[in-house]
Image (cartoon, rainbow, N blue to C red):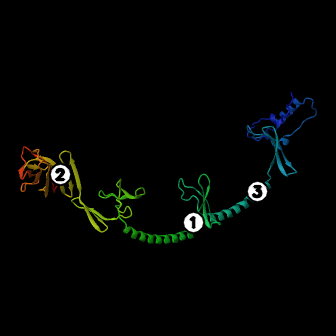
Amino acid sequence: MGLETGTYISDLLPQNPPATDPRSQGADHLRLIKAVLKNTFPNMTGEVSATPDDLNNSISGIYGKSAGDLRMLGFYWQVSSGYVIAVYKDADGNTIYNGLANATDVTTLQSSLASFQDKQADTNADLSADISNCVSGIYGKSAGDLQMLGFYQQQSTGRPIAVFNNGTENVFNGIANYTDVSTLQTNLNSALTAQANQNSVFSSKISACVPTNSTNDGVNAPITLFNYFIGDGVPWASANGVSFSFVKTAPGGGLYTIQNLYGDASGTLSAQINGTKYSYAPSSAVHDAGNYDTYVIGGVRTLSFRTTAYDTQLISFPIAFSDTPSSIHITSSEAQSGKGEGVTANVFKGSENKFNFTAHLAYADGAEDHAVPSNQPVTISVTAIGPV
């Protein structure tokens, strides 16, 4: 039985040798190699010889190899590059030639690193000094605040620009200069002076205006709306949720403005029109069908009624007066005798009072007057004027 293609002598050696130096076992390994070669190549002539010194001067390609590690196939000095080349096969069976760094490479790199470290130390010192003069973009930052990304002077506007990201995009926020603030202060002072002057003008004008309550004090309520209705030319206002109109005192040409309008305790209305005072007493009227009519103007009642009566009869007023009427007037139709005699009627003096009066009724019969008898009363109309 021969060796399979791709099989190496080293594959036949123990894969996990003891930690002791394998060269102490060189003789045993040599005898094993000879036996394998003889078994594999029975027709091979000559003698394959190797001494323990040969193995002692060799490097094992598997010494210390663990599972998953790759066996080293070769280890040589490459003249063209001047580097040691380590050769092995990767997991896919590809032969890899890996150059190893020389000591001079390491020392050169170390020298470069030392130089870089010196320069970096100088740079760090410079940066440290610069940082100490910088403003932190997060110092004092609380949750929800945004980190400041930049802070620079913008040439086009001449103002500092603070830069931050709002979560969607970078925001470039201009900051006011001291000159902006001082200019604003100057403008503010000018505006305050102008406003003070305007307030003085307003105060003078307001003092000439009709005041109104600022709040509803339970007695007076502020006027919340004051308007002029174009439809009929009447001004109106609202207060305490109620709207009301004002009387227009000069509605058209040829008419006079009411200069003063007031009422007294009796209910009399007085108005001053074109310099003259006019008074208007309160009035009322009642028509009691079939009984009487009464008119009251300024505390004076006019009472009219119709009834039948005879001479010296006591006649009651349908509505009593507060005092004896100043005037009682009686008219009558013809007598009831059927002869068409006229009837005279007048108050029988001394008998009238605020409740009733006595009438003197007579009719003419030829050259004589006769009292109207009780069995033939006549219809009379009475008008009395007196205090309510």
Residue 382: percent from left, percent from top: 15, 51
The image quadrant of residue 55 is top right
**Between discs 2 and 3, the one toward the N terminus:** 3
Residue 106 appears anywhere in the view? yes
Q: Secondary structure at mark 3?
A: helix
Q: Secondary structure at mark 1?
A: loop
Q: Which residue is mark 1?
A: 176
Query: Mark 3 packing: few (<14 Cα in 10 Å), some, or many (20+)?
Result: few
The image quadrant of residue 206 is bottom left
The image quadrant of residue 13 is top right
Q: CA distance from mark 3 to mark 1?
A: 52 Å
Q: CA distance from mark 2 to mark 3?
A: 141 Å
Residue 95: percent from left, percent from top: 83, 41
The one nearer the camera, 95 or 87, is 95
The one nearer the camera, 27 or 114, is 114
Q: Which residue is mark 2?
A: 304
- Which residue is painted at 74% across and 38% down in the image? 68
Q: Secondary structure at mark 2?
A: strand
- CB within 8 Å, label 2 to label 1: no
| Outermost right residue | 45
The one nearer the camera, 175 or 366, is 366
Residue 201: percent from left, percent from top: 42, 71
